[in-house]
Image (cartoon, rainbow, N blue to C red):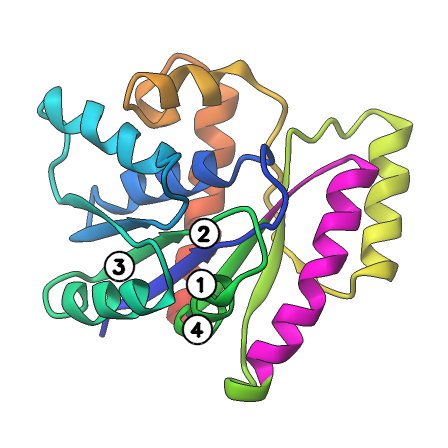
């Protein structure tokens, strides 16, 4: 049965496509995987895939786009016939396509940076999650800390505030503030194909954690 991971965040610039492309690229090493880029016309994930395909690195990975929730549902139905995994890269806004992704996904990851504006934006998403749960009570939405610097007081304070304020589960793996992510993305690569060992390790841990959740969910 096809498993679906939705990457959801209503604020732009929080690393949504970075998380989506890396998870898709790593998952494709073992399973036939598709990534659906719903952030059109920007299409960061679709552009990343285009570069990757030109380099002959597409492998088991395919990419399509969806401009609205109807196209998203149609793409999921089509891709589920022959793909083990589907990654949905959602747009940075609250829309029908976001609600659809929450309902369709077995696991929803919400990238979150350690800054107050990103936390405020994520709080706006709680209503949409609640609406999705009216259709699918077991929506599994979890925060993923991105650009996280564990040694700073502000990060620790914001982490505590999020834990009590948003009431969402958090992935154990945190992604650090590393240029490797943007460097790899610009070249159609995952960080596993880049030179930063710390980035490789933490992304590998995130994919392992997500895989375990999908198996037990």
Q: What element carries label 4?
A: helix
> Which is more N-terminal, label 2 or label 3?
3
Q: Is mark 1 on a helix, strand or loop?
A: helix
**Nearer-the-camera pick, 168 or 123:** 123
Examine the image and state in which quarter residue 178 appears: top right
Task: Sort mark 2 into few (<14), some (14-19) or many (20+) by Cα contacts within 10 Å.
Answer: many
Image quarter where the C terminus lies is: bottom left
151 or 185: nearer the viewer:
185
Quadrant where the image shows the N terminus: bottom left
From this view, report whether residue 65 is shown above or below residue 149: below
> Mark 4 or 2, which is nearer the eye?
2
Does label 4 or label 2 sit earlier along the sequence?
2
The x, y position of residue 43, in whole percent, is 35, 36
> Mark 4: few, some, or many residues within 10 Å (few <14, many ≥20)?
few
What residue would you read off at disc 3?
85
Q: Nearer the viewer, mark 4 or mark 1?
A: 1
Q: What stretch is highlighted in magenta?
A: 111-133
Magenta-span inclusion, residue 182: no
């Amino acid at each position: 049965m096809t498993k679906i991971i939705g990457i959801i965040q209503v604020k732009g610039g929080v690393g949504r496509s970075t998380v989506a492309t890396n998870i898709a690229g790593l998952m494709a090493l073992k399973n036939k995987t598709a990534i659906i880029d719903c952030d059109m016309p920007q299409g960061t994930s679709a552009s990343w895939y285009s570069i990757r395909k030109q380099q002959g690195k597409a492998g088991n990975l395919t990419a399509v786009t969806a401009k609205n929730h109807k196209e998203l549902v149609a793409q999921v139905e089509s891709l589920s016939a022959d793909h083990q995994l589907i990654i949905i890269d959602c747009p940075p806004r609250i829309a029908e396509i976001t609600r659809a992704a929450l309902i369709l996904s077995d696991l929803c990851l919400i990238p979150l940076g350690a800054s107050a504006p990103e936390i405020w934006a994520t709080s706006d998403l709680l209503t949409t999650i609640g609406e999705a749960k009216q259709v699918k009570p077991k929506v599994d939405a979890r925060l993923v800390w991105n650009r996280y610097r564990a040694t700073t007081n502000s990060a620790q304070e914001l982490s505590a505030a999020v834990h009590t304020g948003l009431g969402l589960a958090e992935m154990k793996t945190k992604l650090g503030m590393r240029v490797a992510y943007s460097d790899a993305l610009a070249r159609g690569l995952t960080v596993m194909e880049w030179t930063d060992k710390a980035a490789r390790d933490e992304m590998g841990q995130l994919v392992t954690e997500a895989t375990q959740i999908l198996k037990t969910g």
